[in-house]
Amino acid sequence: MNNMRYLSILLILLSAFPFKALSEENPDSLSHENTHKITIPDSIACLLNNNALKIDSLTNENTALKGLLKGAQRETEMRERDITNLQRKIDDLQNITIKRLEASNDTLQRRLISMASNFLYIPYDEYSIDEIAIPAFISTKGTSAYTQYHNRLPLLQNYRDDLSTLISFLTQAEKDLSIGLTRLRENKAKEHLSNILSMPLYQRYSSYDDWKNTYLGTQICTIQKYLQTPAEGTAAQLKTIRTKLERLLNSK
């Protein structure tokens, strides 16, 4: 009973889905009349066409952007070369300017030292030495000019003290050479001549190659000359120098 029921149901299903059996011997024997041509819907074809156009457009844009990028790279390289060349020129100009400034500064330092040194060649003046000459000379410290001419600075700094020392020396020499005995006067003259050579002021001045032309250097050389050939009038000659130097020391 149940078998009959299952058979009836199977027949109903088969009748509802009819089909044509394929021959096992020749599966390609399907009739051409029963084959159907595959067609693409218009909506899909339109979408594919639009996408193809977008791809072409994007490809063209990409090509154009690549061209612009190459141009920009070339422009950047040119600008970098220009910047490098300009920087080189700036560096050259800076080096030239620095060298000119250094040369100008060196010239200025030497002029300051020359100006300060000029006060050694004129009679002592306290204001000129303390307020002009010494500050000007010290302002060049650290330069090649200062190193070259530094031995002049102690002459300026000790101008007043050296003047006082020379006055004291003359005072004693004048007294010792006032004696009337020639032999004794000559011995005293030699003694003072030797003393002047060992004085610190003489050591300072003799270290300067042009010391004999300075004001005090000229006085020292004159004193040496008198002491080398002492005579009755030598004491008076020394007194004349002493009096002149004292006036400088006492003047304001």
Image: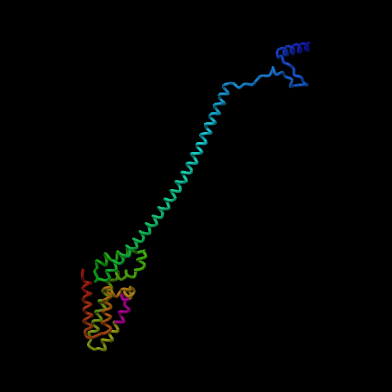
Label tally: 0
Q: Is residue 42 above or below residue 76?
A: above
Q: Nearer the viewer, residue 32 or 21?
A: 32
Q: Residue, x 32% and y 79% (percent of image)? A: 197
The part of the chain drawn in magenta is: 193-202
Q: Residue, x 31% and y 82% (percent of image)? A: 194
Q: Is residue 22 above or below residue 174?
A: above
Q: Nearer the viewer, residue 103 or 199?
A: 103
140 on left or right of 17: left
Q: Position of residue 154 (x, y in %)?
A: 32, 70
Q: Position of residue 116 (x, y in %)?
A: 29, 67
12 on left or right of 111: right
Q: Quadrant of the N terminus?
A: top right
Q: Is residue 4 above or below residue 240?
A: above
Q: Is residue 66 magenta?
A: no
Q: Quadrant of the C terminus?
A: bottom left
Q: Position of residue 109 (x, y in %)?
A: 33, 63
Image color mode: rainbow
Q: Residue, x 41% and y 55% (percent of image)? A: 92
206 on left or right of 2: left
Q: Is residue 197 magenta?
A: yes
Q: Position of residue 190 (x, y in %)?
A: 29, 84
Q: Hey, which quadrant is residue 95 in on the image?
A: bottom left
| Secondary structure, magenta segment, majority class | helix
Q: Hey, which quadrant is residue 56 in on the image?
A: top right
In the current view of this chain or complex, which residue is farthest to the front? 32
